[in-house]
């Protein structure tokens, strides 16, 4: 018997259209705004108390003391800048790459603290510093940041989104 082939687009063709079509641009908008909210929330939570943000950086016991204050004080401004750029959709791919690198650094720092048996609050959304071992949430923090990393990866792969300055500038 001769095999019959079903007419119509292949599964790969349907997937390509879904990823490259107009729905992907709306999905990209949701991803972009979600990541903007994350960075905005993180930056706003830290900016009011830069000394606390520096203490959170210090608690990881990774960086030399000479870098603790500049990073602790500067990180909230970087996070707010990323949030603003994502909100307006300007330089989306570059901002997504920076976001991914920052998230990888956060994931690595949390994993390092966990592996070395240091009991800290990550300080990701304010606070931070040494806590009782029963209060650590390393796995949840790594999984959460990995989810945010997936959002950044989508924007690296597919930076064109609806309602973005990038789209208006390209027009």
Image: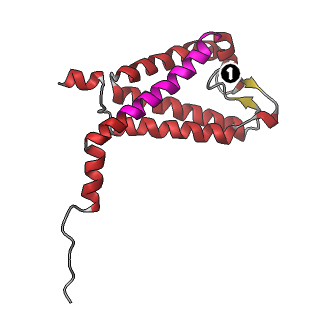
Name the magenta segment's main secondary structure: helix
Is residue 88 left or right of 126 when viewed as pictured? Answer: left
The residue carrying mark 1 is 56
Would residue 32 appear left or right of 136 to someone viewing this image?
left
The residue located at (24%, 26%) in the rendering is 167
Q: Is residue 79 magenta?
A: no
In this rendered view, identify the residue nearer to me: 92 or 66. Answer: 92
Q: Residue 107 is drawn in which quadrant? A: top right
Q: Residue furthest bottom?
A: 1
Q: Where is residue 20 shown, x and y percent of the image?
A: 26, 44
What residue is at 62 percent from the left and 33 percent from the top?
109
Above or below: residue 111 compared with residue 88: below
- The local secondary structure at tag 1 comes to helix
The mark tally for this picture is 1
Q: Residue at x 22, y 21 (%)?
A: 169
Q: Which residues are magenta?
A: 29-49
Locate residue 55: give its quadrant: top right
Q: Tell me the quarter of the image containing the N terminus.
A: bottom left
The one nearer the camera, 137 or 9, is 9
């Amino acid at each position: 018997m001769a095999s019959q082939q079903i007419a119509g687009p292949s599964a790969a063709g349907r997937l390509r259209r879904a990823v490259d079509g107009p729905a992907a641009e709306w999905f990209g908008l949701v991803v972009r705004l979600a990541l903007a909210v994350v960075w905005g929330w993180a930056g706003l939570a830290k900016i009011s108390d830069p000394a606390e943000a520096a203490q959170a950086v210090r608690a990881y016991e990774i960086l030399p003391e000479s870098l603790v204050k500049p990073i602790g004080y500067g990180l909230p401004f970087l996070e707010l800048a990323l949030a603003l750029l994502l909100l307006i959709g300007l330089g989306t791919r570059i901002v997504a790459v920076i976001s991914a690198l920052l998230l990888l650094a956060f994931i690595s720092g949390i994993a390092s603290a966990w592996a070395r048996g240091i009991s800290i609050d990550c300080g990701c959304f304010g606070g931070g510093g040494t806590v009782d071992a029963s209060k650590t949430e390393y796995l949840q923090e790594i999984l959460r940041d990995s989810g945010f990393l997936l959002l950044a990866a989508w924007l690296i792969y597919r930076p064109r989104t609806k309602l973005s300055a990038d789209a208006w500038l390209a027009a």
